[in-house]
Image: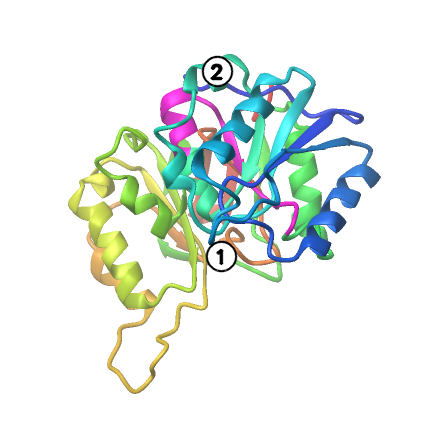
Amino acid sequence: MYNFPPRLNAGDKIGIVSPASRPGDVQKFQNGIQYLKKKGFEVVVAEHCLDEYGYLAGPDRQRADDIHQMFRDPQIKAIICSRGGYGTPRLLHLLDYDLIQKNPKIFVGYSDITALQQAFLVQARLVTFSGPMVAIEMGDSIDPFTETHFWSLLNNLSSQYQLNAPETLPFQVFQSGVAEGPLIGGCLSVLAPLIGTPYMPDYQGAILILEDIDEEPYSIDRNLSHLKAAGIFNQIRGIIFGQFLDSEPKDPSKPSLSVEQVFRDLLGDLAIPIVTNFAYGHGKQKYTIPFGVKARLDTDNNSLQLIEPVCC
């Protein structure tokens, strides 16, 4: 059983952290803060949010301390990451998961933040959200579809929430069927290295949802092969592939498979529903995905439905 965070209400305090890289465009970061304030929220920026240590937003201990401070502060009701980038796997052994479990809060991010979200799910039993970030979408004219579903989901107490594909981004049925289970996943290239660590979720009976960016077919092949060799595909009930952006081979003169060919080679023998091109990932238009929440994937009706509340 997972911990569901309390819903977000108007006027609540939102904490901003940079657990991976420093915001590359400080103006977009400031724009994102103003966006949240215009939405009616108070904003608290973590002490080391704009620090710089190579490609990281400061040393590991300081970034971990910022996360602890936000979970420790009872006035902070939600924590939104400034951006992804690099470095969250370095924090996993430094975090106080008992503190996080005792103070469940909405935690939002994607990309490199995947490592934290999987660790929170395993070690703190906390449902987290793959959704827009402060210095990315919120700081740069957030897509209306993305914005609408983000805020409606964080305020949702209903036992059902529909995630039908938008007309502009229909998903494709790779293999038909119906499946129910908790949604677990994230950015493939960040998730795969967690296999064999104490931060890998239990995928038994889950619906695996994956996306990535700037990974060539051979890299996607390698990471999916890692999941397959670890037996994860034998445990899950369905797969949802979000957007795999900029995944074309960098050198077209060299022989390569397509991403679709990789999917067919590695997944063609699975007797579970699989869809591709779902509105989820690094693209501007996407659903917010709550990791750990039970969902129903029905390819016959082209639908994905959350079948339990995401907040309490």
**In this picture, residue 46 sits left or right of residue 33:** left
Please provide the residue range marked out in magenta. 118-135
Q: Residues within 10 Å of mark 1 (few under 14, many from 20)?
A: many
Residue nearer the viewer, 119 or 301: 119
Q: SS class of the residue under badge 1?
A: loop
Which residue is drawn at the image coordinates 21% and 49% (left, top)?
Answer: 226
Query: Where residue 176 sits: x, y (%)?
Result: 36, 50
Residue receiving disc 1: 171
Q: Callout 1, which amino acid?
A: Phe
| Residue at 49% from the left image edge and 19% from the top image edge | 100
| Foreground of the two, 76 or 27 | 27
159 shown above or below 218: above
Tell me the quarter of the picture where residue 285 sits. Answer: bottom right
| Image quarter hosting the N terminus | top left
Q: Residue 214 carries which label?
A: none
* Mark 2–mark 1 CB contact (< 8 Å): no
Q: Residue at coordinates 43% horizontally, 27% vertically from top-left?
A: 120
Residue 156: image location, x then y, percent? 66, 28
Q: Is residue 12 left or right of residue 46?
A: right
Residue 39 visible: yes
Residue 298 lies in quadrant: top left
Label 2 sits on what residue type? Answer: Leu
Tell me the mark number nearer the camera, choosing from 2 and 1.
2
Residue 124 lies within the magenta run: yes
In percent of width and height, residue 69 lies at 58, 23
**Res. 267 in view:** no
- Residue at screen point 62% across, 19% down: 6
Q: Residue 99 carries which label?
A: 2
Tell which residue pokes out farthest to the bottom in this image: 253
Of 114 and 162, nearer the camera is 114
